[in-house]
């Protein structure tokens, strides 16, 4: 039997699916996991660990295991995309108008301003100490993990749920899949047409993998 849980976290609609004979006990804990991660990783919370880190420059800061693991995921994403995906864009996106969560942005700001901005620094500008688990941000560098954090959270929640049965977690379009459904079939993943929300423009059939269908259309 397929069990589902929908909730709101990280400014997005979330969905967790698990196949199990009865409702898995862990399913109800998924929103609590995301709340814990958001308190560490959100740039919109003044008391989050990430916000506190962004206030400190040119000296090492010991970080939690959660923030450390997401930083490693972000570093990998930056390497794989030759710097196209990087968490060092915070100052640029704030200047462009994305200075608060999507669900409280004024509608006229949905299409954020175009502006000429300095190229972001690479994460290689950070000093990291693996043994001490410390991070040193140079002056002028702040972080917003964005999609890297959501992708990590989806994968982490999926890993915890897969002990109960085949699982899928959709964190605002960042999707993690544990493996095939109980009957061996793949999971169907539909991509919604942003101009015709009731229509799909593509449907994928996937097993153990991750996929991103992210956009701002389902944020509000």
Image (tube, rainbow, N blue to C red):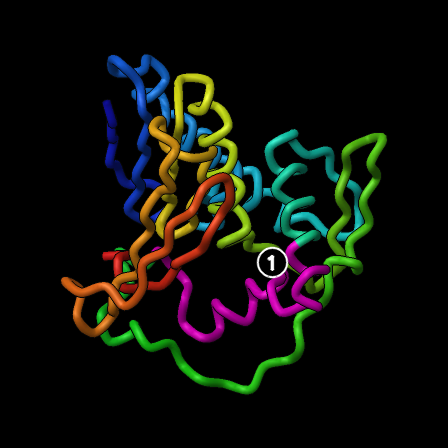
Up the image or down, 48 lies above or below 143; here it is above
Task: Say if the magenta span includes residue 51.
Answer: no
Residue 204 falls in image quadrant = bottom left
Q: Determine the residue positioned at 30% across, 73% down.
A: 109
Question: Is residue 218 shown left or right of residue 154?
Answer: left
Is residue 93 depicted above or below 60 in this figure?
Answer: below
Count the numbered circles shown.
1
Image quarter of the C terminus: bottom left
The residue sitting at 49% across, 73% down in the picture is 95
Q: Quadrant of the N terminus?
A: top left
Q: Position of residue 99 (x, y in %)?
A: 41, 63
Q: Secondary structure at mark 1?
A: helix
Residue lying at 29% horizontally and 72% vertically, measured from the top left: 110
Residue placed at 46% from the left, 18% from the top?
A: 163
Structural crowding at the residue carrying mark 1, measured as other residues with C-alpha within 10 Å and reported as few (<14), some (14–19) or many (≥20): many
Q: Is residue 60 left or right of residue 214?
A: right
Residue 168, given in percent of the width and then of the height, sits at: 38, 36
**83 in magenta:** yes
Q: Which residues are magenta?
A: 77-101
In the picture, measured across the screen, residue 157 lies left or right of residue 50, that is left
Seen from this angle, which residue lies furthest left?
198
Residue 27 at x, y percent in the picture: 32, 22
State which quadrant residue 169 falls in: top left
Q: In the image shown, does 43 or 219 lie closer to the viewer?
A: 219
Question: Which residue is tagged 1?
Answer: 87
The image shows residue 175, relative to residue 213, as above or below, that is above
Identify which residue, 89 or 54, lies in the foreground. 89
- For the view shown, which residue lies furthest in the front direction? 184
Quarter occupied by residue 4: top left
């Amino acid at each position: 039997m397929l069990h589902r849980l929908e909730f709101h976290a990280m400014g997005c609609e979330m969905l967790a699916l698990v196949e199990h004979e009865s409702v898995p006990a862990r399913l109800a804990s998924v929103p609590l996991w995301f709340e814990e991660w958001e308190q560490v990783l959100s740039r919109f919370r003044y008391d989050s660990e990430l916000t506190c880190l962004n206030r400190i420059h040119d000296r090492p800061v010991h970080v939690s295991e959660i923030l450390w693991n997401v930083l490693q995921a972000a570093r990998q994403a930056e390497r794989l995309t030759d710097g196209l995906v990087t968490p060092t864009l915070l100052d640029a996106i704030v200047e462009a108008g994305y200075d608060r969560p999507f669900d409280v942005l004024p509608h006229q700001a949905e299409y954020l301003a175009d502006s000429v901005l300095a190229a972001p620094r690479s994460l290689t500008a950070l000093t990291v100490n693996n043994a001490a688990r410390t991070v040193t941000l140079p002056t002028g560098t702040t972080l917003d993990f964005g999609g890297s954090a959501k992708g990590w959270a989806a994968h982490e929640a999926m890993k915890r749920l897969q002990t109960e049965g085949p699982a899928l977690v959709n964190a605002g379009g960042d999707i993690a899949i544990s493996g095939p459904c109980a009957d061996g079939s793949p999971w169907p993943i539909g991509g919604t047409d942003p101009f015709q929300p009731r229509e799909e423009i593509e449907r994928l059939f996937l097993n153990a993998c991750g996929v991103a269908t992210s956009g701002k259309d389902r944020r509000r």
